[in-house]
Amino acid sequence: MKRPLAVTGFVYLAASAAAVFLGQGVLLPAGAVMLLGLAMSLKCSRTRRSGAVPLALITALAAFAAVGLYNNAKIVPAEKLAGKQAVINAELCELPYQRYGQYYYTVNALELKSRDGSILHDVKLLVYADEPLEASPSDIITADVRISRTHNSYDRSKGIIYRAFLPYPQTVRLHEQEHKPLYYYILKMRYGICQRIERLLPNEQAAFVKAFLMGDSYSFDDDTVSSLRAAGLSHIIVVSGLHVAVIVNILMLFFVRIMRMKKRRAAVICSAVLLLYMAVSGFSPSVVRAGIMQIIPMLCAFAFRRSDPFAALGAALLMILIAKPYAAADISLLLSFSATLGILLIQRPMAVRISKGLFRVSRGRRKNRLLISAGAVILDAFTVTLSAVIFALPVTVLYFRQVPAYSVVSSMLTSFALPFLMGSVLIMLVLDISFVLSFLAVPAAFVTGLLTRQILFTADIVSGLPFAYIQLYWGFVPLWVILCAALAAVLYLRRNMRHRIRLFALTAALTFMVGYAANYLVQRDTVTILVPQVGQGVTVMIRNGNDSFVIACGGENSYTQSAVHELCLGSEKSIEYLLLPGKDKEVSRFAENILRDISVDAAGIYDERSYSASVRQALDKCGKVLRYNANDGKIRSIGQDGCVIESLRAYRICAVYVHIKSCRVLLCCDGTDCAGLPEEWLSTDILIVNGELKNTGLLSYDTLIISDREKYSDITYREIDSDGSALRTYMDGSITLKI
């Protein structure tokens, strides 16, 4: 069997990702099926001799077992503590950051004790508060918090099991450790680098450079992230193989060509520098994968041996996933792995085949040789980009449900600037640190700013082009992409099957059509309720089959792009009825964006004159506008396609009641006094609340959804969320319920 280490690493990643995404319930049945398959493969002499199938099944079983053990040891206890008050004695183990008006602190709880006596040790949490703490890395924090489980795959990939809200930051007790651990100095180095970048560059450029150099994207605004994603350039702000390769090339050029150092000694120094860079970047799964893949070839060269890139990739995956099983759900690792695999598999054959057809010119003339050399450089950049995009496409579809149409073009336009950007950033930082040449850091910062503006300008232009990205709204698309990718991999690996690529393309097209028809039939009788994460505010969309209704569209300004994007995905860019239950920004901030980006058949609006002129102008695009008066206290009702939507806007009341098929949904907005609601509204299947409410004890429900930043949780929600089973957007992210 060829490349057993590569097979082991790839299968371990696939099995770990399947175990994480499918959940704890499928581990035992899937494990039993794999055990049966393993027994059958060992019984068959052909598969037993090759060894590939038994090795793959054993690896998959090991991955499932590792995820299962991790779940039982770390994840399952979170279910017991969810919604409970606890006291933590924790060590701050990362730099704090601010996002969406809240302050976040990653801590390692030395002891976590709930009020019912449960005690856990050595647990990683993400603590957040509305006010900042005067804490620095390695400080010991003692505080009362409210524990909640996290469904965020990014948190879990970093080992974070719980989220904890800090309601009273002023009562926190801080203790500075006398003996600082090693990582304290690494974090201080990271903080110092960020400070120098912020001092030398404007805000937008500094945010981009921090993300580009160290993966610190917390200071990015949503608009920039959306434009980078739509242009297919989001990989730039994820530290991965591109960044590590550029750093290694720069270091080897400096040590070997300038310092005249032997390659073996330079390789050892570069490996040490890479380890430091990985630590400063926070040991994210993508940078660890890239760093290991660079260190292994350099150490092999030191031992006078050739390295296998596939084996190095497999070894890197094994090292990451054994240490952190949930790293298989990390989007940066999956994108980095798939892009690297694409480059290793198809880049060189693609470049050779294209070059044979393009560069058939005479070799005698120097001009032709220069053209061939320039063309080869451009061709390499094109084939590297194309192969990475092709293999990363399934991951992009699964996570973002969109395909950047011009990703190859935008990557080509920026690929040549990235090495120069990395070089200028490193030179800028080195010069700024030096005492004698620190004045030269300003010209280097100017060059860095020019390159940064060029990349951001490219992202803005490409993302603004018509059909910049293709939205994939249908639920069957992820499964279809996985099956097509698996079948394409089988055809590629079996050389005698490559001639059947046309049959594969025809089969893929037919399965897409069948999937679309089946999805249409299934969705026709399905009710979907979407509550996106919007900070302080609430946005609710209800979908009945292929008809979509939005009964609130508010939140914080920083969530505008993400909220509208989720509504576009959920509604297929068509809304039958848009209700603006009030002029408050918490329930209507995104109205203008929705009316501009999505087709709205009818809109219901209270007190039209209280809205801005741009919103009133955008309402002209609707086929029908229903204008309501908030002063008469009447219940407004509209029935459409089996859905009845009733709204009440009066003094101290802002509520919407939806009766759709056999499901009842009640939305209570900030300031609502539940005593003034109609009696039939008080008992509901799904209750959605936001802000400060009164007389919540009158409400009864089966499912509670809280759309908030937990500003009022201890006051308002304690009475209706006594068992801590509520779904919270600020903890669980965007919430989708299917009925």
Image: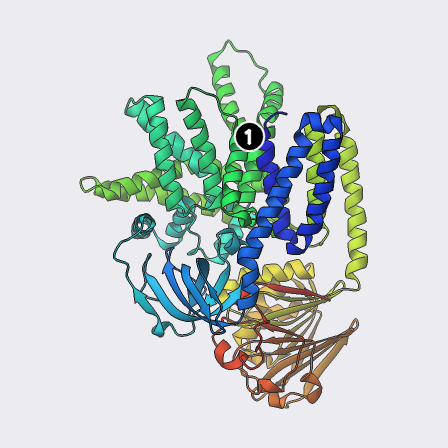
- Name the amino acid type tagged 1: Phe
Residue at the spot 60% in from the left edge and 44% down from the top edge? 63
Residue at the spot 46% in from the left edge and 20% down from the top edge? 305
Quarter location, residue 510: top right
Quarter location, residue 174: bottom left
Residue at the spot 30% in from the left edge and 38% down from the top edge? 427
Specify whether 601 is left or right of 234: right
* Quadrant holding the C terminus: bottom right
Specify whether 701 is left or right of 73: right
* Quadrant holding the N terminus: top right
Specify whether 502 is left or right of 384: right
Q: Specify how the rendered protein is coloured.
A: rainbow
Q: Can residue 385 be seen in this view?
A: no
Residue identified by numbered label 1: 310
Of residue 318 and residue 170, the one placed in the foreground of this image is 318
Of residue 279 and residue 27, the one placed in the foreground of this image is 27
Identify whether 444 is placed above or below 123: above
Q: Can residue 277 be seen in this view?
A: yes
Near mark 1 (Cα within 10 A), the count class, few <14, some 14-19 or many ≥20, is many
Identify whether 283 is placed above or below 605: above
Percent from the top left, x then y, of residue 200? Answer: 30, 49
Identify whether 274 is placed above or below 73: above
SS at mark 1? helix
Percent from the top left, x then y, of residue 33? Answer: 73, 44
Residue at the spot 72% in from the left edge and 32% down from the top edge? 42
Percent from the top left, x then y, of residue 425? Answer: 34, 41
